[in-house]
Image (cartoon, grey):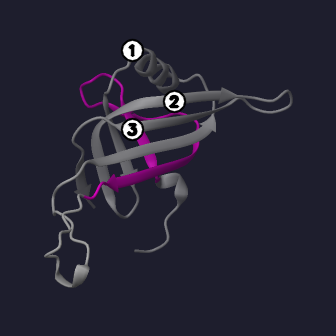
């Protein structure tokens, strides 16, 4: 895989519940993380005393985070609405030269900040809230 532009890693929110995805406004940095818990099934009979893991078991999860400039755009308003209503709409995560991850996420935090002589900024964190699908490019 060749080097990619960081600005091409996009987090998009479903604006209507009908698959109309729009990029969260003002993001300047984004991050996606995938995790899978392991289930240890090691016993006295494990060959050579090596740990054994149960394939296909354990909880899988994903988290998204981003930071950027507060713009008070329609997607900013949608994010606030989702947070305060504790909704778990679908999101679309575009990972350049890799693929697209789609599925429900819950916004776990939104932080707003600003300084006297600087721009207003925000940070957002999301946790997967159901099954995700991956579509390779």
Determine the CA span between mark 2 and mark 3: 10 Å
Residue 76 locus on image (x, y percent) = 52, 25
At x 41%, y 44%, the residue is: 63
What span is colored magenta in the figure? 9-38
Image quadrant containing the C terminus: bottom left
Q: Residue furthest front?
A: 44
Query: Is disc 2 placed on a helix, strand or loop?
Result: strand
Query: Is disc 1 placed on a helix, strand or loop?
Result: helix
Location of mark 1 (residue)? 85
Location of mark 3 (residue)? 127
At x 53%, y 33%, the residue is: 25
Closest to the observer: 41 or 45? 45
Would you call the spot at circle 3 few (<14 residues within 10 Å), some (14-19), or many (20 or more)?
A: some
Closest to the observer: 90 or 72? 90
Would you call the spot at circle 1 few (<14 residues within 10 Å), some (14-19), or many (20 or more)?
A: few
- By secondary structure, the bulk of the magenta-drawn segment is best described as strand
Q: Is residue 65 above or below residue 37?
A: above
Numbered label attached to residue 100: none
Location of mark 2 (residue)? 109
Closest to the observer: 78 or 105? 105
Determine the CA span between mark 1 and mark 3: 15 Å
Judge left or right: residue 54 versus residue 8: left
Q: Residue furthest right?
A: 117
Residue 117 locus on image (x, y percent) = 86, 31
Q: Are marks 1 and 2 in contact (CB under 8 Å)?
A: no
Q: In the rendered structure, does residue 24 fall within the stretch colored magenta?
A: yes
């Amino acid at each position: 895989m060749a080097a990619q532009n960081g600005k091409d890693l996009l987090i998009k929110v479903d604006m209507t519940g009908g698959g109309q995805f729009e990029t969260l406004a003002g993001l300047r940095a984004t991050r996606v993380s995938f995790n899978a818990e392991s289930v240890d099934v090691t016993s006295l009979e494990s060959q050579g005393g090596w740990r054994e893991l149960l394939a296909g078991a354990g909880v899988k999860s994903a988290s998204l985070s981003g930071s950027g400039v507060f713009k008070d755009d329609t997607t900013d308003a949608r994010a606030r609405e989702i947070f305060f209503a504790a909704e778990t709409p679908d999101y679309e995560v575009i990972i350049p030269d890799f693929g697209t991850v789609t599925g429900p996420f819950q916004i776990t935090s939104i932080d707003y900040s600003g300084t006297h002589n600087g721009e207003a900024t925000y940070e957002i964190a999301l946790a997967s809230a159901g099954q995700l699908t991956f579509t390779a490019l």
